[in-house]
Image (cartoon, coloured by chain):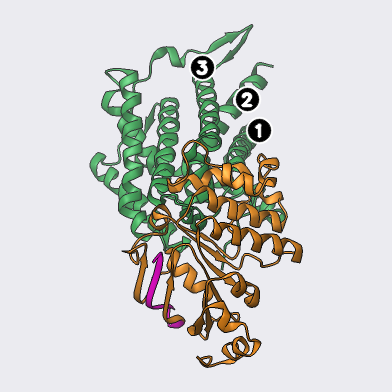
Chain colours: A orange, B green
Amino acid sequence: MMLETERLCVNYGRIVGISDVSIRVQTGTIVALVGANGAGKSTFMSAVAGLLAPKSGAIRFDGEDVGALSPERRARKGMSLVPEDRGILTDLTVGENLQLARSSGRSDPARPFDEALARFPILKEFWARPAGALSGGQQQMLAIGRALVARPKLLLLDEPSLGLAPVIVDELFAAITDLRDAGSTIVLVEQFARRAIQISNYAYVMKNHCVVAEGPPAKFADEQVLNKAYLGGEADE
Amino acid sequence: MSSLVQGLVDALSIGSTYALVALGVALIFGIMRLINFAYGEYFMVAAYAMLAFDQVSLALSFLFVIAAVVAFSLLTERVAFRPLRNADPSTLMITSFAVSYLVQKVAIVATLGEARTVQIPESWLTPLQFGGISIGKLEIIITVAALAMMGGLNLLLTRTALGIQMRAAAQDFRMARLLGVAADRVIMSAFAIAGFLAAIGGFLYVAKLGSFTPAIGLPILLAGIVSTVIGGLGSLKGAVIGGYLLGAIQVLLQIILPSDLVAFRDALVFILVIVLLLFKPTGLFGSYVQRV
């Protein structure tokens, strides 16, 4: 088990962020986390990565309780969050953004950038350019490429397709599937629920800060099941 | 001609001192969003540290000042600012005021507020002669030292892993941490470098003054903050340019103002700064806008 949360609750002051979220992510799988805006998906991802402190509940990463660790400690243990805004450091060059990912101390000491550059050759071409000059799609490639330099055990992707042209989204989903097939473990938060579930090994649907449905992709193959989960209540078993 | 060259050298050396202070202020602000009003006291610590060995050896005195100010800078980070790291910028700023007052009052009590004199090698004070034009040697030392440190800082920030981490943290601290950048290490590095800049800047500034009181830090801090505001808070390049600009304006006003108006020089400087901010509220190179 790569990641397991147990009855995880996070509050923003008095406002509930997520409530009792229990999720299990098997090693080498893609787990999709879908739901409407404001359901608590990003809050969940931030809590797992250490940006938000849980009010209660547990986060176990690769068998270890990491709930009290700082974000950088979790990164060093092999967690890599690509946040919704991608977190591109626009004042730095593309190359510096990639070099920064070596801070986790997990990258290949001899050939740290090979995998990222092989997967996204454009990053090599734009190596010396300011990252702020990249287009949205290129920035997303940089964000994922940067995560690859860190060679994470667990990749947390928060809305990677946000704001991208459809053709780029196709490439992106292909890249995510490739990564899983190469052995990576991925949690994928997506607005394109159907597509995310299709490439996943298991999916969770969140609504109003809680998980309201879960199951393998086959369970959601019927349009009705997903719609029902989105609209409310537990989908039928 | 002679007075023109001397004016230029004065502007460069004063500007260099301001630029060093402004860099220290900007570096810490960039990473922590802290406007460190205690930074003037780093210069005061440098001044008192000079007294320890100034009669013994210049080199020893110099090294001791660096060690003392860097240690003091790290101490303020550890004791005063680290516990408040996630507090909002105004809380941090007020804390820095408290640190400033505390340290300054301790110095006043310990020295009864009396002025102290430092021993400077005679050779530093004899002006250099260039075909009838005499230029202060210390002014040249200050300018060269400041430029060397800016060059060194630039190399550190662009060519080393630590430098890239520091620039990343200055832009987006949260993302830097997500990539594994250790928050403590980056912040302590910024304070250590700011302390180093204050040590060198303070050493040379005090050498030029010859004597000082516990209040030595205030004017220099003010100049540093004004420089960073002119250049744009958060921009290191802006801090340097703001420092030189402020130095140049001060020297220029000193020269062109009629003698009975010289007393109002700084008032005029601040009016110019206000006018600049009216047209360019973020300073010349700044992009920082207070996030609400």
Question: In this rendering, is residue A10 above or below B63?
Answer: below
Q: Work out which residue is located at the far left of the displayed protein and give it.
A: B110
Report if the CB atoms under discs 1 and 2 are less than 8 Å apart. Answer: yes
Q: Which residue is mark 2?
A: B7
Q: Quadrant of residue A118?
A: top right
Q: Secondary structure at mark 1?
A: helix
Q: Secondary structure at mark 3?
A: helix
Q: Which residue is at a point 32% across and 50% down the rendered structure image? A: B78
The answer to whether residue B272 is visible is yes
Question: In this rendering, is residue B141 above or below B183?
Answer: above
- Chain for numbered disc 1: B
- Tell me the magenta residue range: A1-16
How far apart are the two marked residues, 2 and 3, measured between alpha carbons?
Answer: 14 Å
Please identify the dominant SS of the magenta region. Answer: strand
Structural crowding at the residue carrying mark 1, measured as other residues with C-alpha within 10 Å and reported as few (<14), some (14–19) or many (≥20): some
Q: Which residue is mark 1?
A: B252
The answer to whether residue B116 is visible is no
Quadrant of the image containing the N terminus of chain A: bottom left
Q: Position of residue B7 (x, y in %)?
A: 63, 25
Q: Which residue is mark 3?
A: B137
Q: Amino acid at mark 1?
A: Leu
